[in-house]
Image (cartoon, rainbow, N blue to C red):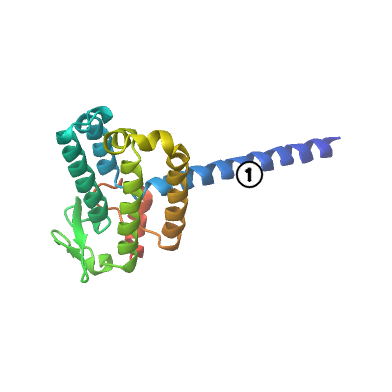
Amino acid sequence: MGGSTSTSSNTVSLLTTKKKTVKDRTFTAAGNLIKPLPTGTVFLFQFLNPFLSNTGHCATANKYLSAILIGISGLSCCFASFTDSYTGSDGKTHYGVATAKGLWPSTNSNSVDLSNYKLRFGDFVHAFFSLILFAVVSLLDTNTVRCFYPGFESTEKVLLQVLPPVTAVIAGTVFCVFPNNRHGIGYPFSSSDSSQDSDKS
């Protein structure tokens, strides 16, 4: 009888562990889909777009302002893919732009080999797909749709619902093939990132 009790408790603990790992993997996957976009840029767009587009009720000036915001935010997403950071000899975090020779500028970098931060093919892949992801997020935003193409919201509801997750899955697959361990401008710095500094190549 005691043996059956221990077997059932082992089964319950295995099921609980399996549920936790599935849940953890789901959250990790969701986090990886959000990670390609710099949080500051996305937040700024989400904050300013309702004001500049007059919550979708656009005059000509609103359309110009919204288009400028989308363009600058898209360029920011693209540019951020080529930035990285390191902890300098002064103990502070310094940001720079990845180049073919390493990270620039290289202030207080006596203790860091900045050639490990040089430009890679994956950076261009991330920049391109970050731009695509931001385009989907911004151009299918409710205020943007109502401002630039109001008829689209009623006639293409299925496309508005399907395109974001499909794009996210494609981008997520590409980012799995080209993993990004940069933590540049606009990206959150985590403890796991700091452990990867020594692994950069």
In the rendered image of this protein, does residue 163 appear above or below residue 197?
above
Residue 10: where, in percent of width, then height? 72, 41
* Residue shown at the point (41%, 57%) measured from the top left: 175
Residue 180: where, in percent of width, then height? 36, 58
In the rendered structure, the answer to whether residue 19 lies left or right of residue 179 reads right
Residue 190 visible in rendering: no
SS of the residue under disc 1: helix
Q: Which residue is mark 1?
A: 18
Q: In the rendered image, which quarter contains the C terminus? A: bottom left
* Residue shown at the point (46%, 39%) measured from the top left: 161
* Residue shown at the point (47%, 49%) measured from the top left: 166
Which of the 4 image quarters holds residue 41? top left
In the rendered structure, the answer to whether residue 190 lies left or right of residue 118 reads right
Nearest the viewer among 154 and 118 is 154
In the rendered image of this protein, does residue 194 appear above or below residue 59?
below
Which of the 4 image quarters holds residue 66? top left
Nearest the viewer among 66 and 25 is 66
Residue 9 visible in rendering: yes
In the rendered image of this protein, does residue 118 appear above or below residue 25?
below
* Residue shown at the point (80%, 35%) measured from the top left: 5
In the rendered image of this protein, does residue 140 appear above or below residue 115?
above
Residue 77: where, in percent of width, then height? 26, 50
Q: For the residue marked with disc 1, what is the amino acid?
A: Lys
In the rendered structure, the answer to whether residue 159 lies left or right of residue 83 reads right
Which of the 4 image quarters holds residue 85? bottom left
Q: How many marks?
A: 1
